[in-house]
């Protein structure tokens, strides 16, 4: 079914936090399974801490037929939220893009990212930064297809043998 034309992109409501949490957990479970067991609990803790971030963050959802299929967080460059990783002046940050596995390949993720790009542009941001891992191949492909490019200066390693790669979308190009 082609749902892309019927997807409603909107701000999340406070009452939807548990739904968003469940979507993030379901969307990320395949990546968590590949991690060493010793790292899984800490990774989930960080995911949930990020979801509960206080401060100015735009919580955006994709809805179809009354059901939330995906979500994303957009931190403006002016945000002082503690969980922000990208701290370059004039850079917004896209975090925790999550789409239900059953809704993947239907334009949900692309619609959420395009909304982040639209909002960041309106807010006068220079760039949007994000982080991902090679294991998230479909996400990497989606980011690159939508114009994000590798930005190694954002790379970091939270543990031995793990590389979190930085990408950016530059509005000046």
Image: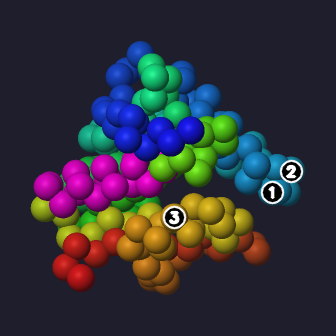
Outermost front residue: 1
Q: Nearer the viewer, residue 69 or 16?
A: 69
Instruction: Say which quadrant the C terminus sits in.
Output: bottom left
Which residue matches tag 1? 35
Residue 49, image x and y in percent? 53, 39
Residue 35, image x and y in percent? 81, 57
Q: Main secondary structure of the magenta part?
A: helix
- Would you say residue 132 sits in the magenta stretch? no
Residue extent of the magenta highlight: 108-123
Determine crowd level at label 1: few under 14, some 14-19, many 20+ residues with C-alpha closer than 10 A: few
Q: Nearer the viewer, residue 90 or 160?
A: 90
Say what secondary structure mark 1 lies in.
loop
Say what secondary structure mark 2 lies in.
helix
Q: CA distance from mark 1 to mark 2?
A: 6 Å
Work out whether mark 2 precedes mark 3 in sequence or the reverse, and give the earlier one: 2
Colour treatment of the image: rainbow
Tag of residue 37: 2
Q: How many marks?
A: 3
Which residue matches tag 3? 142
């Amino acid at each position: 079914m082609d749902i892309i034309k019927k997807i409603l992109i909107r701000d999340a409501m406070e009452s939807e936090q548990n739904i968003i949490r469940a979507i993030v957990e379901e969307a990320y479970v395949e990546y968590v399974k590949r991690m060493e067991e010793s790292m899984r609990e800490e990774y989930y803790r960080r995911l949930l801490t990020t979801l509960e971030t206080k401060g100015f963050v735009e919580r955006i959802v994709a809805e179809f037929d009354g059901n939330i299929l995906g979500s994303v967080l957009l931190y403006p460059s002016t945000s002082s939220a503690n969980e922000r990783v990208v701290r370059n002046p004039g850079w917004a940050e896209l975090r925790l893009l999550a789409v239900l596995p059953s809704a993947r390949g239907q334009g949900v993720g692309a619609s959420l990212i395009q909304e982040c790009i639209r909002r960041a542009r309106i807010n006068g941001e220079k760039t949007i930064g994000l982080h991902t891992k090679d294991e998230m191949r479909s996400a990497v492909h989606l980011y690159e297809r939508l114009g994000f490019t590798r930005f190694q200066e954002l790379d970091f390693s939270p543990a031995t043998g793990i590389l979190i790669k930085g990408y950016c979308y530059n509005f000046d190009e």
